[in-house]
Image (cartoon, grey):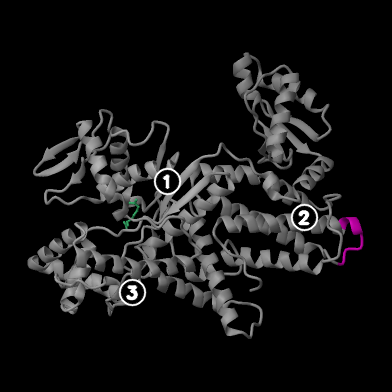
């Protein structure tokens, strides 16, 4: 149990002794530090409950609080706000209980099993900046969930189904008509066919094919036929599809790896297809499939709808299934194969309606249990300085690889220490680059759009990944230099800075709980900046290693270790690696 939760529990008893029963108490960091470090506002709700004056209630509570030696400077402000400060002795004792393991200062909710669907990569198309936020936010939420005790599975849910793949195969066929994949009489081993195509080729092929399809009706029709062949698992076309998925997946994986984003499941839209028959029977048995102009739809409108709710297109008029269909089938698949309590979708905010449709259909069909949660975790857009989605200099789509390189070049220039080994220097620059990209992305609340400003993001000062990393590395090097010096416990908190750090440490569990509740990492970046800045202020005003008073020096080192541990824990939660030096 966290320190603050323990105090809240004890306060409940104190309130009880004063004659008041409350369900829970929240000791809040005060916004009037001159009056006390914390405030307690419960006198107002109790006033309603007991039909008494809040001031009188506050006075009765204060009488009890004064008997407890962990509190000091107890006073009442205004109509009944109680201000309170924790004594140094108490604070020191509490901090010493968590120094061995910072996890002790985290409050964990009831365990749950979660699947997070994030990343959204599409096979044979290059990842572009639009995919960045889903990948890094999803990874962060996965880690946050695990830190808070949830069992979390991250699923890449690849876009590996449907028309784009048909288009790509058609274009390959045009380029290499004699490839054995297209030979109906081929009886050999498909794995032995040499496909003269790399991932870079694939990324070029899709836009070409897509353009041709827009201009040429016959080309589009040909692609459609091939798409159906892939979906019907017609030998050569299906084998080629597998090969394309393979090539593409390797590349997608390597981009995600470079972002330090990792998945437990690499399933795709196509994996849900084997559940479509079962899904169809469920829908039919509940009479949910309606005919509409040769298509099959699920009507979703409800009485209290404030906005129009279009029906879900389950089978298109040409017989093929839609993006909605695979998402619905994927829910059935996930329930059957993994039985999660919740499924979170970390997807661009513009897909909100799509998911509302899918969730409603899932509820109508009862393929999830009532208590199960399906949650859309939408996010805003990363824009350029012109306020439009971030592009390359000539206005083209910026691939995720180029974006990462751009930031790497910037962080490479700013490495402060001399490093001879070029390889090592690039390695460090790339870790710092990912830190800068992620940290800046997490600063605004997830639904907010933000502007990509590379110089600002990579700056060594201010709210940046660089600043936090640099400071954290410095804490570590101080700790390394102090090897051999006793670091058992904190004896006192001598300076104001230390006390402020201690109070910020007390606030850690509240921040984590809030971040999990709103599924946004902005609370964590803000907290990291606050704690790091407080520590840096302390560091610049005190010479830790040469301090003569041994007890003070020991206290300072243990406090440094605590802050360092918290920084490492939170950076790891954000998916940020700390390099040895920078
Ligand atoms: N591949 C999709 C896209 O690029 C995103 C997938 C999001 N996840 C999902 N279950 N639909 O738009």
Instruction: State the mark number for residue 457.
Output: none
| Residue, disc 2 | 559
Element under disc 3: helix
Q: Nearer the viewer, residue 118 or 31?
A: 118
Q: Say few, some or many: other residues with alpha carbon within 10 Å of mark 3 (under 14 / 14 to 19 / 20 or more).
A: many
> Is 469 one of the magenta-colored residues?
no
Q: Is residue 572 visible?
A: yes
Direction top: furthest residue: 51
Residue 402: give x, y in percent of width and height: 41, 74
**Residue in the picture at 65% in, 15% down:** 52
| Quadrant where ligand 1 appears | bottom left
Quadrant, the N terminus: top right
- 394 left or right of 313? right
Residue 507: give x, y in percent of width and height: 66, 44
Look at the picture and state if 137 lies above or below 123: above
**Does the residue tagged 2 have its C-beta within 8 Å of any atom of ligand 1?**
no
Direction front: furthest residue: 187
Q: Are marks 3 and 2 in contact (CB under 8 Å)?
A: no
| Residue, disc 3 | 199
Q: Nearer the viewer, residue 513 or 49?
A: 513
Element under disc 2: helix
């Amino acid at each position: 149990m966290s320190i603050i939760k323990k105090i809240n529990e004890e306060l409940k008893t104190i309130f009880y002794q004063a004659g008041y029963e409350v369900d829970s108490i929240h000791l809040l960091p005060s916004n009037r530090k001159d009056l006390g470090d914390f405030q307690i506002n419960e006198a107002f709700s109790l006033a309603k409950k007991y039909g008494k004056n809040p001031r009188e209630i506050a006075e009765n509570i204060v009488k009890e609080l004064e008997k407890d030696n962990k509190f000091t400077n107890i006073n009442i402000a205004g109509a009944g706000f109680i201000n309170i400060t924790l004594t140094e002795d108490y604070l020191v004792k509490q901090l010493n209980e968590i120094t061995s393991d910072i996890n002790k200062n985290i409050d964990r909710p009831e365990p749950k099993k979660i699947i997070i669907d994030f990343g959204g990569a599409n096979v044979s198309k290059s990842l572009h900046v639009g995919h960045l936020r889903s990948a890094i936010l999803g990874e962060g939420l996965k880690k946050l969930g695990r830190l808070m005790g949830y069992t979390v599975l991250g699923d890449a849910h690849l876009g590996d189904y449907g028309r784009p793949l048909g288009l790509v195969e058609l274009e390959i066929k045009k380029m290499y008509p004699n490839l054995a994949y297209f030979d109906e009489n081929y009886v050999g081993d498909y794995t032995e066919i040499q496909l003269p195509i790399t991932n870079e080729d694939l990324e070029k092929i899709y836009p070409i094919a897509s353009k041709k399809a827009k201009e040429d009706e016959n080309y589009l029709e040909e692609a459609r036929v091939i798409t159906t062949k892939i979906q019907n698992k017609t030998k050569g076309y299906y084998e080629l599809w597998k090969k394309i998925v393979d090539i593409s997946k390797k590349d997608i994986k390597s981009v995600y790896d470079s972002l330090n984003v990792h998945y437990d499941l690499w399933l795709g839209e196509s994996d849900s297809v084997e559940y479509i028959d079962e899904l169809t029977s469920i829908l039919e048995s509940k009479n949910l499939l309606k005919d509409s102009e040769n298509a099959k739809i699920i009507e979703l409108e409800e009485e209290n709808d404030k906005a129009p709710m279009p029906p879900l297109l389950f089978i298109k008029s040409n017989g093929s299934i839609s993006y909605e269909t695979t998402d619905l089938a994927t829910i059935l698949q996930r329930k059957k194969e993994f039985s999660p309590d919740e499924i979170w979708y970390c997807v661009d905010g513009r897909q909100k309606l799509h998911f509302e449709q899918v969730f409603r259909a899932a509820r109508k069909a009862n393929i999830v249990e009532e208590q199960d949660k399906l949650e859309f975790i939408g996010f805003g857009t990363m824009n350029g300085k012109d306020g439009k989605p971030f592009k390359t200099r000539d206005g083209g789509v910026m691939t995720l690889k180029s974006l990462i390189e751009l930031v790497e070049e910037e962080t490479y220039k700013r490495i402060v220490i001399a490093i001879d080994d070029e390889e090592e220097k690039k390695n460090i620059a790339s870790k710092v680059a990912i830190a800068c990209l992620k940290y800046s992305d997490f600063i605004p609340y997830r639904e907010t759009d933000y502007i990509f400003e590379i110089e600002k993001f990579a700056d060594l000062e201010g709210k940046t990944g660089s600043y936090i990393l640099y400071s954290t590395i410095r804490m570590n090097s101080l700790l390394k230099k102090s090897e051999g010096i006793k670091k058992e416990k904190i004896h006192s908190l001598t300076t104001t800075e230390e006390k402020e750090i201690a109070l910020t440490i007390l606030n850690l569990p509240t921040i984590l709980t809030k971040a999990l509740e709103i599924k946004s990492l902005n609370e964590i970046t803000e907290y990291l900046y606050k704690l790091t800045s407080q520590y840096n202020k302390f560091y610049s005003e005190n010479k830790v290693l040469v301090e003569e008073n041994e007890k003070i020096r020991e206290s300072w080192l243990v406090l440094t270790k605590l802050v360092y541990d918290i920084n490492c824990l939170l950076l790891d939660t954000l998916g940020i690696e700390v390099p040895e030096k920078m």
